[in-house]
């Protein structure tokens, strides 16, 4: 594979690491008879123990990494989210917080410090993180910035069962491995990966998984409403995210699940014109669409189909409490009041925060593409974050 000249060059060590990840995936392809699904490829590239992008040592988040998330942009994000969490916890007998995929630990830190100010700290702030390297970063950050709160923070190896309280995940669903489906003429195929001419290549084959086939079949009239032949349409199906919702529904006794991610409802996701899907890769702040580039050194993601997530949630006895854009959610929850706590005359502090607020809520940046969705169990109180701008009809 040739290196992309316009991207920053990897170090020798990073390149050697990527070659090892490629060798591991190639071995898996050969052991599986010459073909693996894209879901298996993505799983290995991101999560192969000690090797995958999220499991190995590379800096992923922030300016020295590959991409930036809302908690990394500004503490305003976590502090505002804390206002919503405080409202929820007032209604619950037991209101621990369980965060999935806590990244650098920045969101946990901002939430805990804000809840401390309003005397609304949870008994326990639990973190479930699949990446050993990120878990280490989270521990280092929280120990140095909030040592007095460490007795409340606990890292888990598996889902707590049962759990009551608030479950939180920012940009976790988009990092789950997806299947790639291809609609070609009248056939539905699964796009997988082979090793050919000393590199990874795509190869499509009939869909073997019955669940996957049923979902693709149901989507056919949506993506090809005019029943045109000759169409090649590729998109992602996230079975893992639906399974994740079912697992959460099973353990949650009482409380709220809050998910934040980029994506849309199924009409927009599987729009006939979105014929190349939403798969995206991030390497050192360059976004591109080649998942075979430097395996193990780049992030691979897809947008979230919030309709599929909601179907899985509602089928598992969760109720939809709200669905809106990040902009509406943050404004409804009180982001401008949080900003107003910094005096406008204090320009050195106020101006950077005001710019960060713009990034979080501006429709051309994160405000519109990112959505917030909430599900409840034994919880009916209207949530402040969804008081205006509800978009549930689009699911
Ligand atoms: C794009 S990063 C987002 C990190 C962080 N939430 C933030 O907003 O900065 C994705 C995170 O999800 C984690 N992750 C992916 N699948 C997961 C799963 N099934 N359970 C828990 N964490 C997961 C990754 O290890 C990583 O920490």
Image: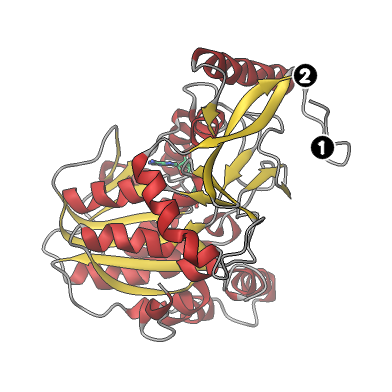
Instruction: State the separation of the CA atoms marked 1 and 2.
Output: 13 Å
Q: In this view, does 207 lie above or below 311?
A: above
| Disc 1, SS | loop
Q: Is residue 104 visible?
A: no
Front-most of residues 268 and 302? 268
Badge 1: few (under 14), some or many (20 or more) residues near its Cα, within 10 Å? few
Q: Mark 2 points at which residue?
A: 12
Front-most of residues 187 and 83? 187
Q: In this view, does 109 lie to the left or right of 180?
A: left
Q: Measuring 43% from the left and 54% from the top, which residue is drawn there?
A: 217
Q: Position of residue 236 (x, y in %)?
A: 52, 50
Front-most of residues 231 and 180? 231
- Residue at the right extreme, as displayed: 5
Q: Mark 1 points at which residue?
A: 8
Q: In this view, does 134 lie above or below 393?
A: above
Question: Which image quarter is the N terminus in?
Answer: top right
Q: Measuring 28% from the left and 69% from the top, which residue is drawn there?
A: 86
The answer to whether the residues at label 1 and label 2 have Cβ atoms under 8 Å apart is no
Q: Where is residue 379 in the image (x, y as percent from the top left)?
A: 17, 70
Q: Measuring 57% from the left and 55% from the top, which residue is drawn there?
A: 69
Q: Measuring 38% from the left and 67% from the top, which residue is drawn there?
A: 373
Q: Position of residue 158 (x, y in %)?
A: 26, 35
Q: Can residue 75 be seen in this view?
A: yes
Q: Where is residue 263 in the image (x, y as percent from the top left)?
A: 52, 63
């Amino acid at each position: 594979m040739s290196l992309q000249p316009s991207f920053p060059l990897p170090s020798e060590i990073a390149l050697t690491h990527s070659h090892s990840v490629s060798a591991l995936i190639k071995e898996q392809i050969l052991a599986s008879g010459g073909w693996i699904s894209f879901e298996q490829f993505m799983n290995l590239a991101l999560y192969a123990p000690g090797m995958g992008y999220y499991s190995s040592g590379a800096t992923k988040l922030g300016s020295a990494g590959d991409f930036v998330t809302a908690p990394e942009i500004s503490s305003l994000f976590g502090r505002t989210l804390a206002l919503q969490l405080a409202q929820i916890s007032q209604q619950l007998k037991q209101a621990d917080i369980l965060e999935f995929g806590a990244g650098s630990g920045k969101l946990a830190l901002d939430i805990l410090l804000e809840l401390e100010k309003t005397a609304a700290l949870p008994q326990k702030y639990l973190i479930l993180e699949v990446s050993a390297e990120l878990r280490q970063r989270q521990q280092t950050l929280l120990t140095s910035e909030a040592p007095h709160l460490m007795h409340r923070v606990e890292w888990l190896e598996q889902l707590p069962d049962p759990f009551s309280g608030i479950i939180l995940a920012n940009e976790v669903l988009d990092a789950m491995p997806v299947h790639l489906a291809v609609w070609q003429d009248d056939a539905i195929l699964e796009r997988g990966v082979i090793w050919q001419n000393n590199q990874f290549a795509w190869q499509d084959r009939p869909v073997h998984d019955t669940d996957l086939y049923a979902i693709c079949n149901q989507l056919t009239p949506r993506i090809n409403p005019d029943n045109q032949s000759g169409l090649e349409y590729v998109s992602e199906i996230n079975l893992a995210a639906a399974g994740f919702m079912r697992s959460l529904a099973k353990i949650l006794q009482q409380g709220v699940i809050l998910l934040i991610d980029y994506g849309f409802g199924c009409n927009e996701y599987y729009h006939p014109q979105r014929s190349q899907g939403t798969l995206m890769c991030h390497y050192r702040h360059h976004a591109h669409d080649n998942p075979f580039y430097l395996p193990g050194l780049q992030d691979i993601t897809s947008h979230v189909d919030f309709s599929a997530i909601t179907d899985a949630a509602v089928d598992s006895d969760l109720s939809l409490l709200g669905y809106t854009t990040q902009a509406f959610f943050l404004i409804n929850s009180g982001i401008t009041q949080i900003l107003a706590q910094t005096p406008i005359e204090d320009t050195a502090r106020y101006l950077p925060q005001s710019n960060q607020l713009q990034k979080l809520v501006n429709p051309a940046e994160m405000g519109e593409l990112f959505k917030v969705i909430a599900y409840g169990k034994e919880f009916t109180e209207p949530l402040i974050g969804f008081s205006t701008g509800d978009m549930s009809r689009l699911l």
